[in-house]
Image: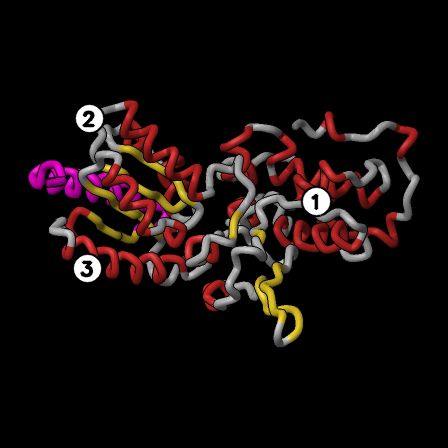
Amino acid sequence: MSVKSIFNKKSDIKSYNTNIIFKRTNKWENELNKCIRCGYCYELCPLFKSFNWESDTPRGKLLLIYGMITGDIKPSKEIAEKIFQCFYCLKCSDNCSAGVPVTEILTDARADLLDAGFDVDGTIVKIDEDLCSVCGICLSVCKYDALSLDGTENNQKIKVDKVECKGCGLCVAACPSGSISQKEGFEITLPEMHKKVQDILKEDVNKKVIIFCCNWALFPGMQLSDTTTVVKMPYGLIVTMCSGRVTPELILDAFEEGAWGVMIAGCPPDECDHNGNYKARRRLLLLQNFLKEMNVDPERVRLEWFSSNESVKLRKSIEDFAQMVNQLGSIDRD
């Protein structure tokens, strides 16, 4: 959906009190005026890469917010949905030539829109209370305190703070009952990643290695470097919002579909905003022990760290891993 298509008719303008609805966001009007519309913010935006609509870019969202706080655009469910679609990778703020604090503005706009009654999904996680056992595992993995216990002692449930949730999805990967999910369509849910694995292995029988790359630190570097030929290599490359989202089930599914090896390329230990890399490492150690029990060489699964400027290192690591996997051959399923 384009920015133009979600602008409201002129007759609807000024039909609401912007001072009341946008009590938090109003303070950012001067910062919004600093935006020079250069477009650096969306070059690395994962949502723009998926949909290619201006309204999915950080710049487009800032224009929508500016229009709402000035009264030129009437708030709507469609606009609110766009504002709540963000993974907070901070690439927009880091690359803004005017120094506009994009994600801070988005956070305040979210809070104001929620107060105004716009309850939308966006990239926020949601809880299926019928499946949730309130085990509390999700609480321990959420770095942003976006999940909390709610209700009485005998009737507790997990509550999601839609303003604080960054959409990283670590709680989705950690939930043992599968009660936490995210809206599909952003290529980040487990069913969508399962389908990616299946499509890669079915479309090209020569691709025997699946590489999961972290969008936060690694993939931007591959896009901007001179060594982007890594994307054209005969290996299946899947970009995930965090290495911590790669579950053991996803890796086992890759093996079941015919992969000979799976490599996870994540952020270096001190560079992950979610601590997802540590969680990925713990899961991998457990999975390798399981593979050993199943008489599958645990070296078929590898986790390595890469910064955004290390695409050459990534390519060399993939080549070494693929060579090792080719020497191992296919997995004996007897």
Residue 219 picture quarter? top left
Residue 97 locus on image (x, y percent): 58, 44
Q: Is residue 146 visible?
A: yes
Whole-angstrom CA distance, mark 2 to mark 3, is 28 Å
Residue 198 locus on image (x, y percent): 33, 32
* Amino acid on which disc 2 is placed: Asn
Total numbered circles: 3
The reply to whether dot 2 and dot 1 touch (C-beta < 8 Å) is no
Residue indicated by mark 3: 289
* Amino acid on which disc 3 is placed: Asn
**Nearer to me, 141 or 180:** 180
The reply, left or right, for residue 224 in relation to residue 139 is left
The reply, left or right, for residue 299 in relation to residue 250 is left
Residue 269 locus on image (x, y percent): 34, 61
Whole-angstrom CA distance, mark 1 to mark 3, is 54 Å
Q: Which residue shows up at 66% across the image and 35% down it?
A: 60
Q: Choose mark 1 or mark 3, whichever is in front.
A: 3
Residue indicated by mark 2: 206
Q: Which residue shows up at 68% across the image and 45% down it?
A: 120
Residue indicated by mark 1: 34
* Mark 2 secondary-structure assignment: loop
Crowdedness near tag 3: few (<14), some (14–19) or many (≥20) residues, C-alpha within 10 Å: some
Q: Quadrant of the C terminus?
A: top left
Residue 64 locus on image (x, y percent): 73, 38
**Nearer to me, 3 or 111:** 111
> Principal SS element in the magenta part?
helix
Residue 327 included in the magenta stretch of the image? yes
* Mark 3 secondary-structure assignment: helix
Q: Quadrant of the N terminus?
A: top right
Q: Which residue shows up at 9% across the image and 37% down it?
A: 329
Of mark 1 and mark 3, the one earlier in the sequence is 1
Q: Choose mark 2 or mark 1, whichever is in front.
A: 2
